[in-house]
Image (cartoon, rainbow, N blue to C red):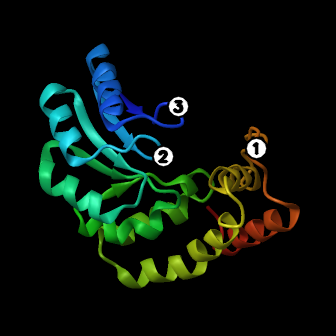
Amino acid sequence: QGILLLPHYLTEASPEGVAAHVESVCKSVKFGVVVYNRNVCRLKPDQLEMLAERCPNLIGFKDGMGDIELMVSIRRRLGDRFTYLGGLPTAEVYAAAYKALGVPVYSSAVFNFVPKTAMDFYKAIAADDHETVGKLIDDFFLPYLDIRNRCAGYAVSIVKAGAKIAGYDAGPVRAPLTDLKPDEYERLAALIDKLGPQ
């Protein structure tokens, strides 16, 4: 058992306040906690080192910020104390770089609607198969990003659209997010279709 501790709901907080929040959660449960560094939860090496000492059940660090300098600093400071995961939207485009930093795994949103492609990509990353990685990035992930980057919040919208195209309708996004426009939805459907059976 364990939990992924998402950022707190407030718009801002001091680093000390964020660290105190993480410590409070860790001390309130008897299982593993993975902290998700993103948005308003921005822990730095000093805070993570302190938390690692005080909270034996803080077992993992998931990065959703993409700050390479910070990630290197955290990994060098804390070594193997944590399990590390990449957690950026469309983490595949960062996977090779993060693997080189000592972050061998990542969460994949596209697994929700193109699981075969997601697994093919993961296996290629794990095997250092740069040819397959490059082909999948060129053929799928970069065109996918072109759609996703058209509007703030589309990192969620495009996953819901992909799931609907794959036959797993999860309904519309919640306000204030917006769903893909019809032409963007059709572009995504064509992109998924080109991948073949999933």
Residue drawn at point x = 26 percent, y = 17 percent: 27
Give the mark, 2 or 3, whose residue is nearer the N terminus: 3
Which of the image's four quarters has the C terminus?
A: bottom right
Amino acid type for the residue under numbered disc 1: Asp
* Residue bearing mark 2: 39
Residue 98, percent across and down? Answer: 32, 65
Element at badge 3?
Answer: loop
Front position among marks 2 and 1: 2
From the viewer's perspective, tell me whether residue 133 is left or right of residue 158.
left
Amino acid type for the residue under numbered disc 3: Leu
How far apart are the alpha carbons under marks 2 and 1? 28 Å
Element at badge 1?
Answer: loop
* Residue bearing mark 3: 10
Query: Is residue 103 something that shows in the picture?
Result: no
Front position among marks 3 and 1: 3
From the viewer's perspective, tell me whether residue 159 is left or right of residue 22.
right
As drawn, the label of residue 78 is: none
How far apart are the alpha carbons under marks 3 and 1? 30 Å
Residue 61 lies, with reference to residue 184, above or below; the image says above
Q: Quadrant of residue 13?
A: top left
Nearer-the-camera pick, 82 or 151: 151
Residue drawn at point x = 31 percent, y = 16 percent: 29
* Residue bearing mark 1: 169
